[in-house]
Amino acid sequence: MSEVIRLLPDNIANQIAAGEVIQRPASVVKELIENAVDASSSKVELHIKDAGKTSIQIIDNGKGMSAMDAQMCFERHATSKIEAAADLFNLNTKGFRGEALASIAAIAHVELETIEKDQEVGTKIEIAGSKISLQEPCSRANGTSISVKNLFFNVPARRNFLKSDNVETKHIVEEFNRIALTHPEIAFTFSHNGNVIHNLESAGLRKRIVDLFGRNFNNKLVPIEENTDLVNLKGFIVKPEYSKKTRGEQYFFVNNRFFKDSYLHHAVVSGYDNLIAPKHFPSYFIYMDVPSETLDVNVHPTKTEVKFEDQRNIYSILRSTIKLALGKYNIAPSLDFEREPQFDLTIEQQNSPIRQPEIKVDPTFNPFETSNAGQGSSNKGNSARPMPNTLRPNKKEWEDFYEITEEELTQEEDSTNQEIAFDKPQQSSGSKIQIHRNLIFVQIKSGILLIHLNRANERILYDDLMEQFMLSPIAGQQLMFPYEYNMQNTQKLEWENNATHLKRLGFDWDWQKNTLVLSSIPSMLEIEYVTQCLDGIVEKITHEDLDKGELVHELILSLSAAATNYKNKVLNEEELNYIVDRIFQSEQHQYSPSGNKIMSTITLEELYKYLS
Ligand code: ADP
Ligand code: MG
């Protein structure tokens, strides 16, 4: 038999191992910051160039390495962290396989400078493709600095596989966030192409979260805490009213290690009960501690998956802890969805004398007689902002709803044995009635269809903008006085990364340092809602790994939500018809693009119940 099995040369073995450990610049960032943290550093700096593709440098002030260790650390399975197999079960450090540095040195140009505490001379090493090209004494104040340049220089397939700078940067930001959140006591600096993205001082967890995600997080957080034999839980969850359409900040840590777990995510979501709107996600920062023998962290090479011995019980503990925390802070009543309509009254409305309800129904009314909708009225701004309507109303879908004969009505009446007078509404016609400006009642076969006007407008505008965006840039309105909006460095970076889309939406701007100075905004956006719109956009562009299509959706979503959040005016008949027609043309007429219910039916039966 010929010899087919041979030992691989070390550098090839390292390259293969590298494929598993190092998938992208973010993996290098993760491994190197973890090493810095394991070396008991109190300050760690991360500097990247071109999304880490050109260079990644990590500087720490930790315990450093001796000349011997500095050379050894690039050998495979060189780790100072395990001495006996038993140690594997009691690891408090981040890395323990001793293959990160060897892997990185196999596929990049690495420069290491390190000095041990209380030593006068440090060591400098240059290594590339697993070959040491320089080793000499050096002087440095303390700790270790590692630069990793030209990642995958010798593995072109991997290099070509890297995504855009935008996407790779987001992965790095995510790794950075995860570590920054597990070590609030460590100060971190993060810069990209010379721009400082974060400068985090040593802090407690709450401050760290706020420093990472923005000052407005401070009053969004609700602390959680629960100690049981099985698991100790602590951390923060975000109040339900700040839940988001996009997956935002969802962080689970176990024994101070980040992990993902859809089962436990579900526990959190179900702990929120019905407090969050459909398709919305809560943000959370949840830290669990379990005895290490009940946890398997080796189920996945990049270790974001873990296995708990007793998942099920952890699930229920987690769920009830969330419920309890939300209950304790008594935040349920301040929710702004599925509110009782009277909560939506403005002060002015609340103070006005209560009038007799004016709901009147015309049983002979046929909505199709007058439904040459689509023209809307030319009222400036505040109505549905009708746009040229090229689509035919999709009547079939709602015909069923509408067709109602006198016969049927009489039957209904008889069957419930009630005496109802059907007065004609004062301004003739009108099986559609607007009340409290934001609600429309439409008489339908089985009772009443209730429509949320703002949400309907949001859906209509969203559909229109989507269609328009694809065809041509959306018109902007020039501002007489520039509108200013402050951003953080990352946000500015992302804004510029998305400049083409944002210009197409009608924005135009300059910068004054980190202040966005808008000279033009989308034409349908009222100036008082610009901040709301920008908040939405900035959140989407900074926190999601979205492909182009998803991003366009999110941008238009932010714009249409902000542009339809006004106080409605009283609509005339034509306008009401227009809205109802238009909303039913939408394939998604049940939900607004932000995921809120647009319409609901109330059956006659239910209505009569109020009168029994
Ligand atoms: P692991 O972290 O799994 O032990 P690595 O390849 O990441 O393996 O690192 C190998 C060894 O190099 C570590 O065990 C540690 O002793 C040493 N080392 C790496 N980075 C640093 C650093 N920043 N400061 C001090 N020692 C370090
Ligand atoms: Mg390591």
Image (cartoon, grey):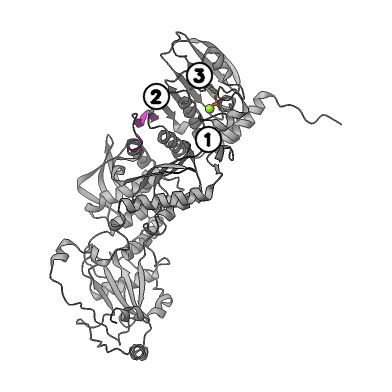
Q: In this view, does 11 lie above or below 413?
A: above
Q: Does the residue labelled 1 lie within 8 Å of ligand 2?
A: no
Q: How far separated are the C-alphas under marks 1 and 3? A: 20 Å
Q: Mark 1 points at which residue?
A: 24
Q: Are marks 2 and 1 in contact (CB under 8 Å)?
A: no
Which mark's residue is nearer the viewer, 2 or 1?
A: 2
Q: Give the range drawn in magenta.
A: 188-206
Q: Name the residue under label 2.
A: 42
Q: In this view, does 568 lie above or below 285?
A: below
Q: Which of 38 and 245 is in front in this view?
A: 38
Tell me which amino acid carries mark 3. Leu
- In the drawing, what numbered circle is on residue 112? 3
| Label located before the other in sequence (2 or 3) | 2
Residue displayed at 37% across by 41% down: 494
Q: Which of 185 and 110 is in front in this view?
A: 185
Quarter of the image where one finds residue 331: bottom left
Q: Under tag 1, what secondary structure?
A: loop
**Residue 194 shown in magenta:** yes
Looking at the picture, how far across and down is residue 109, in whole percent? 54, 23
